[in-house]
Image (cartoon, grey):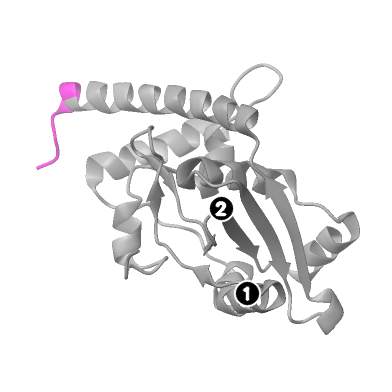
């Protein structure tokens, strides 16, 4: 679909100022009394991106670097174990909500997706023992399905430091249209607020030179 590689400068420009699946939990964070603190923080980050035209700096640590370095191997392992080919895509805009989208780790067939995590070993072990997908990733995956209009997403946790029979975990998450509709409503509200603030700042201070 595109020769743009995830993580490249061109990819960062494709996502500039947009709500993406990897941050959907921040955009929809709620507490018992209202919105969570990560919501305004994420909104401010996107406002700064839109006004400056510069992607926000992303914190990277050793664990995140490990994940990036092992994602391709995990994708190959997933394809081999499931006898499928995985198509990589850089960014898929939401079909109806502008300035939002997702960067899935791969398209599978005509109906599926794959979301790959290569976490630290303790997290991988927790996932193996729990036998289920952590909740924060379910939200991310549902938004990916909303953007790609697909029916399911396989969650993969991969750690080659574990014995072979424990290195790979895969669990399918089916599309939840009710939950997707709720997310879409919250994201539409989030983006409306964001655009109001961008307009107010531009009106008061003018556009960047």
Residue at the outermost right position: 129
Q: Position of residue 10 (x, y in %)?
A: 29, 63
Q: Callout 2: helix, strand or loop? A: loop
Residue on which the image places disc 2 = 111
Q: Is residue 12 above or below residue 118?
A: above
Q: Residue at x 27, y 52 (%)?
A: 54
Residue at the outermost front position: 110
Q: Residue at x 69, y 63 (%)?
A: 156
Q: Quadrant of residue 109?
A: bottom right
Q: Quadrant of residue 32?
A: top right
Q: Callout 1: helix, strand or loop? A: helix
**In front: label 1 or label 2:** 2
Q: Is residue 157 left or right of residue 3?
A: right
Q: Residue at x 58, y 73 (%)?
A: 71
Q: Position of residue 14 (x, y in %)?
A: 31, 54
Quadrant for the N terminus, please.
bottom left
Residue at the outermost top position: 33
Q: Is residue 49 above or below residue 162?
A: above
Question: Is 154 contained in the magenta span?
Answer: no
Magenta-highlighted residues: 203-209
Foreground: 75 or 140? 75
Q: Position of residue 44 (x, y in %)?
A: 40, 35
Residue on which the image places disc 1 = 79
């Amino acid at each position: 679909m595109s020769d743009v590689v995830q993580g490249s400068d061109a990819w960062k420009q494709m996502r500039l100022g947009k709500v993406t699946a990897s941050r959907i939990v921040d955009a929809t964070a709620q507490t018992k009394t209202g919105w969570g603190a990560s919501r305004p923080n994420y909104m401010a980050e996107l406002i700064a991106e839109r006004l400056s035209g510069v992607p926000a700096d992303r914190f990277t640590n050793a664990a995140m670097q490990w994940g990036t370095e092992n994602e391709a191997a995990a994708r190959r392992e997933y394809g081999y174990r499931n006898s499928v080919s995985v198509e990589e895509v850089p960014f898929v805009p939401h079909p109806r909500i502008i300035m939002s989208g997702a960067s899935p780790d791969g398209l599978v067939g005509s109906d599926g997706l794959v979301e790959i995590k290569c976490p630290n070993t303790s997290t991988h072990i927790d996932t193996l023992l729990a036998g289920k997908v952590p909740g924060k990733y379910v939200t991310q995956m549902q938004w990916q399905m909303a953007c790609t209009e697909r029916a399911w997403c396989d969650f993969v946790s991969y750690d080659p430091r574990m014995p072979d029979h424990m290195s790979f975990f895969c669990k399918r998450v089916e599309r939840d249209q009710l939950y997707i509709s709720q997310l879409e409503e919250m994201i539409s509200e989030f983006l409306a607020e964001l655009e109001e603030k961008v307009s107010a700042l531009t009106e008061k201070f003018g556009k960047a030179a």
